[in-house]
Image (spheres, rainbow, N blue to C red):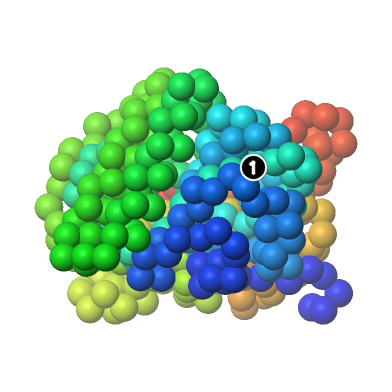
């Protein structure tokens, strides 16, 4: 397996050496300075491709950047916001010499991310794939001011109410970004305020899933990790998210598989081994049940579409009840 590119993990702790960051309890890493050369900062990333193990929100304040993430291409210019959640794979990043940005990175298990609020849940559910928002200059300036406010909260000496203040700031940000994302969607499902127990279970499940899905694909494994019965676990996850636990697991696995197949750098056998399937035949069956075609057929189609300039297909895995 040494002959193909390994997918490295991009853990949030690796940000500790980056310049210009204000850090809260190793949970939140904020950069509100536009003075640093991001071309240099990006060279400090782990060797690509790298799987993001946190959620990052970045706003371009100058220049432009190009990235390929989980098989799709993204472009950001001044006042554009790109949001990338855990589990996505950064394949390539290129920025202009004058590229500048502000950003915030948050751990998925952070105490700051309360999903009892509908806006926070909407944002979480919207970021399965990276999203880009195009802001007006006035909206961009408000984002810069907001980041500065969050920094002031972090650096204040008193810790008595700091956590509550940062939780409130996160809800404000989630509400704003969610409202903008909702405008881009034709149909928006209602996200009611829910009880702490159910949304906490979903949060912990997604955290465990992001860390274990390449090795463990059974609902029972994740129920045991959360110390509840598989039946109750499945009911709570479906009630909270509207999606079955087995479909959450399948989506994470298939997303990695699609990314590797789209890149053209991996054979079907190598994808199967990377995702720790027992053999290529079992992987092929798993993939076909989710996507509707074999891994080889999918790879040939996306490479053909790319060479003809049609772009990458955006189909989602087929969910089974």
Total marks in image: 1
Q: Position of residue 151 (x, y in %)?
A: 38, 52
Is residue 86 left or right of 237 when viewed as pictured?
Answer: right
Residue 234: percent from left, percent from top: 26, 61
Residue placed under numbered mark 1 in the picture: 100
Does any portion of residue 173 appear in the rendered image?
Answer: yes
Local crowd at mark 1 within 10 Å, few (<14), some, or many (≥20)? many
* Residue at figure coordinates x 74%, y 61% from the top left: 43
Q: Residue at x 29, y 60 (%)?
A: 156
Q: Is residue 58 above or below residue 254?
A: above
Q: Residue furthest left?
A: 195
Tell me which corner region of the image, top left, top right, bottom left or bottom right, holds residue 270: bottom right
Left or right: where does residue 135 sit relative to residue 307? left
Q: Residue at x 34, y 52 (%)?
A: 152
Give the side of residue 304 with respect to residue 141, left or right: right
Q: Residue at x 31, y 78 (%)?
A: 225
Q: Quadrant of the N terminus?
A: bottom right
Specify the farthest residue to the front: 157
């Amino acid at each position: 397996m040494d002959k193909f590119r390994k997918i490295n993990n991009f853990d949030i702790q690796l940000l500790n050496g980056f310049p210009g960051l204000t850090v809260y309890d190793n949970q939140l890493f904020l950069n509100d300075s536009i003075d640093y050369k991001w071309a240099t900062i990006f060279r400090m990333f782990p060797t690509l491709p790298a799987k993001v193990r946190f959620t990052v929100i970045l706003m371009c304040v100058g220049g432009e950047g190009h990235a390929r993430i989980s098989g799709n291409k993204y472009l950001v210019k001044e006042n554009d916001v790109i949001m990338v959640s855990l589990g996505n794979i950064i394949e390539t990043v290129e920025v202009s010499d004058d590229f500048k940005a502000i950003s915030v990175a948050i751990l998925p298990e952070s105490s700051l991310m309360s999903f009892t609020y509908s806006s926070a849940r909407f944002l979480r559910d919207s970021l399965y794939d990276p999203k880009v928002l195009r802001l007006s200059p006035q909206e961009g300036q408000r984002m810069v001011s907001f980041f500065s406010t969050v920094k002031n909260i972090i650096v204040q000496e008193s810790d008595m109410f700091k956590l509550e203040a940062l939780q409130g700031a996160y809800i404000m940000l989630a509400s704003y970004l969610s409202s903008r994302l909702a405008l881009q969607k034709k149909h928006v499902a209602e996200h009611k305020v829910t009880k702490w127990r159910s949304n906490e279970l979903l949060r912990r499940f997604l955290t465990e899933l992001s860390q274990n899905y390449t090795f463990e694909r059974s609902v029972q494994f994740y129920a045991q990790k959360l110390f509840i019965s598989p039946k109750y676990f499945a009911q709570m996850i479906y009630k909270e998210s509207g999606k079955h636990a087995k479909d959450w697991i399948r989506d994470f696995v298939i997303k990695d598989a699609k990314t590797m197949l789209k890149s053209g750098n991996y054979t079907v056998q190598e994808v199967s081994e990377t995702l720790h399937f027992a053999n290529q035949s079992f992987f092929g069956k798993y993939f076909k049940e989710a996507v509707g075609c074999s891994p080889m057929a999918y790879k040939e189609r996306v490479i053909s579409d790319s060479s003809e300039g049609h772009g990458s297909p955006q189909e989602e895995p087929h969910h089974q009840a």
